[in-house]
Amino acid sequence: MTEAIDMINLLGQRAKLAARKMRMIDTHAKDEALQTVAILLRQNISDVLAANALDMKAADDNKLEAALKDRLALNPERVEMMAQGLEDIAALPDPVGAISDLVYRPSGIQVGHMRVPLGVIGMIYESRPNVTADAAALCLKSGNACILRGGSEAIHSNRVIANIFRLALHEAGVPEDAVQLIEQTDRALVGALLAADEYLDVIIPRGGKSLVARVSADAKVPVIKHLDGICHVYIDKAADENMAVNIALNAKTHRYGVCNAMETLLIHQDVVSFLPHLVGDLIAKGVEVRGCEKTVAACKDLAVNLASDEDWATEYLAAILSIKVVESLDAAMDHIATFSSGHTETIVTADYATGQRFLHEVDSSSVMWNASTRFADGFEYGLGAEIGISTDRLHVRGPVGLEGLTTQKWIVLGHGEVRS
């Protein structure tokens, strides 16, 4: 444990110094670094894929579950998406230094806010190598330094991506230590990072419930987190059938192992006739359907299993869906209030008043009307990428992009005024 603490302290010292230097780095240099990373990712794609192949082989040898393997896997398309995400972040307005809410006070001074970086951000995440690029890019553009600790299952991929990032920082004249990867897989390093309150300003876990729970319990600095992605689609009695089927199919089957996939479908009892069409399409796509008694009865000619109470509280991250028939909008919102993880919920309805009620009364980080839950994503929201999706209320909620990685400080502009 002593070695782990010493290693984290060294990284922390470097990160803290880099964070101070980052306050002097202008937007052009940050954008140039991000664009260079994108170029180098494309130029070194064979190295990235070769490293990922090592991780995938280890995943097969260790019998990693399918959802985690899907998140771990890279291919040319996913590497290109990483590169494009970096370019998108470079093209976004820089929030750092923006001044807002300036007002004159009777004394003659002006008082307002300036947006500033959080400082040093610790990031602990699992499986997805693209998070290394996304997290580093968002921290860089928002003027922060970061210490990244990816999962051991992605260690080869993460090392290559982090090295590419540091090379680009060097070429752009940006402090290399603004992006540091913990390259060892010793679990003691996680504990040491969580205790590094002398160096870290915030820590962000991105992974399974056990990881988030551990970070929340042990961290000595503020945590930006989300737990499960138990997302709901509610098909209202005023829904168009084709729209409802298309949204539900996309929300469930577009990708299974992601936090914004639908895990529970709620449907109004007046449109239960929609179910055979929808359930037939789901089963044709390989989805196991578990339903309440009314769902089973409505789909008597289809292979629908009876849902248990546990199903309503489960994030499957797999080709499994639970369906419940409800008698009203209020019943749907009561179910969501009971079982939702606060991530994303959608209503499908043509009724304006019903849609408005849902938007106002459902308390999740993203609430949608006639759209797939799969849109709950930093890229789709125009953030360029996201460092995670927060289901907390403080200090940021939903997809966390550039602005979510900054805070505000008070500034005062005077002309020699003194307080009387």
Image (cartoon, rainbow, N blue to C red):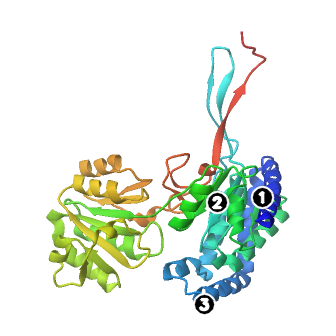
- Separation of residues labelled 2 and 3 (CA atoms): 36 Å
Asked if residue 48 shows in the view, the reply is yes
Mark drawn on residue 178:
1
Q: Helix or strand or loop: what does disc 1 sit on?
A: helix
Q: Quadrant of the N terminus?
A: bottom right
Of marks 2 and 3, which one's residue comes earlier in the chain? 3
Identify the residue under disc 3: 61
Q: Residues within 10 Å of mark 3 (few under 14, many from 20)?
A: few
**Amino acid type at image mark 3:** Asp
Q: Which residue is mark 2?
A: 89
Against 51, is 93 above or below? above
Q: Secondary structure at mark 2?
A: helix
In the picture, measured across the screen, residue 42 lies left or right of residue 331, that is: right
Badge 2 density bin: few <14, some 14–19, many ≥20, Cα 10 Å: many
Q: Position of residue 398 (x, y in %)?
A: 50, 54
Which of pointers 1 and 2 lies earlier in the amino acid sequence?
2
Q: CA distance from mark 1 to mark 3?
A: 34 Å
Q: Residue at x 57, y 53 (%)?
A: 224
Q: Sequence-wise, which precedes: disc 1 or disc 3? A: 3
Residue 400 placement: quadrant: bottom right
